[in-house]
Amino acid sequence: YITPGKRRSHVSNTMSAPPPPPPPPGGNLNNGQGQTPPFLPPGMMPPPGMAVPPPPPPPPKPFIHPITHAFHGCFNFRRHPTKPPVNRLAYTRVILAKLLLEVCGASGAIWGSSEIFFLRDTPLGNEIVRIVAMFVGVIFFYRFWWHAKHYYQHDQDFPPLKEHHRRKWKLPFLQVFASKLVLEVLGGAGAIWGCSEAVTLRNATNKFSWRVAAAAVGYVFFIRWVFQVFAYCLCFAGLWSNPASFRMTLARWYDAFVSKLVLEVFGAAGAVWGFSEIVFLRTPDTVYIWRPIAITIGVVFTL
């Protein structure tokens, strides 16, 4: 019994607090404050009854981690639960068009534009460009796979970059506009070059004239690509801030007719014509087979 007002120091030492209970077998070492050290210092042996905690995970490797992350979940085609069952006919039509225009078209763009700029004039240059075109086709097939997966899951392509913060998403910006540079700038020039040969308009006698025409179309599409980059980065906003202005109306008509005609109609025929030569399917002995195929596909995309 402690008299009120008395100091606790008068209490006998026999009334001290009971000792803390021992740690459970296999439990972690406690530092007296309810905290467990994350790992033992190097060279320190664990005390009896202590479970050795696992070491911290190693940091991700700078080159291996982006590759493994890029392929994570690439085979998961599980449909989004809020979406209705997929329309397989519409899905097949969209995916086949993207496969032709964005995979075969990317390889054909490298193949055709390199001939326009005299990069395939020698047998060695021809084989180097063939390897580069195949490599670009593999990269764009990987891109196509993710787009096909997203379209199957959500019934739409990836949202545009303008829905995100423009200065934060630098890697998507690089991927989108590098793809546009290949598919729309080099692809526009290659579409004119390949389609003109497929429909027998280009031959050995007028090759220079068609080279100038294809290079001019590529230059126009390059200017269009530069303006797209400026518009995304909000540069010269006064040029396209008013959607009802004459220049914006002209740009919409240009994209609706000229761009689609060159990139989708001529581009589809040129993609078949160029890609068949890249993979050794079109030779001087099989030209009579691939010419009607390329022309037929161009007519289908016209419709």
Image (cartoon, rainbow, N blue to C red):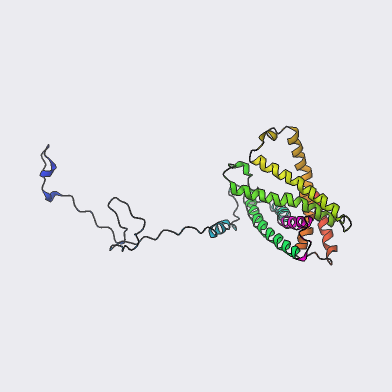
Residue nearer the viewer, 85 or 164: 164
Residue 85 shows up from this direction: no
Magenta includes 298?
A: no
* Residue 197 figure quarter: bottom right
Magenta span main SS: helix
Q: Is residue 285 left or right of residue 65?
A: right
| Residue 130 at x, y percent in the picture | 73, 62
| Residue 117 at x, y percent in the picture | 77, 55
Residue at the location (63% across, 50% down)? Answer: 175
Residue at the location (82% across, 49% down)? Answer: 213
Q: Residue furthest bottom?
A: 285
In this picture, which residue range is highlighted in magenta?
103-123
Residue nearer the viewer, 209 or 231: 209
Q: Looking at the rendering, in which quadrant would you find the N terminus?
A: top left
| Residue 139 at x, y percent in the picture | 66, 58
Residue 105 vertical position relative to residue 124 in the rendered view, above or below = above
Residue 255 vertical position relative to residue 190 in the rendered view, above or below = above
Q: Is residue 138 left or right of residue 66?
A: right
Magenta includes 111?
A: yes
| Residue 266 at x, y percent in the picture | 80, 51
* Residue 160 figure quarter: top right
Residue nearer the viewer, 131 or 275: 131
Residue nearer the viewer, 243 or 186: 186
Residue at the location (73% across, 43% down)? Answer: 224
* Residue 28 figure quarter: bottom left
Number of numbered discs visible in the structure rendering = 0
Residue 275 shows up from this direction: yes
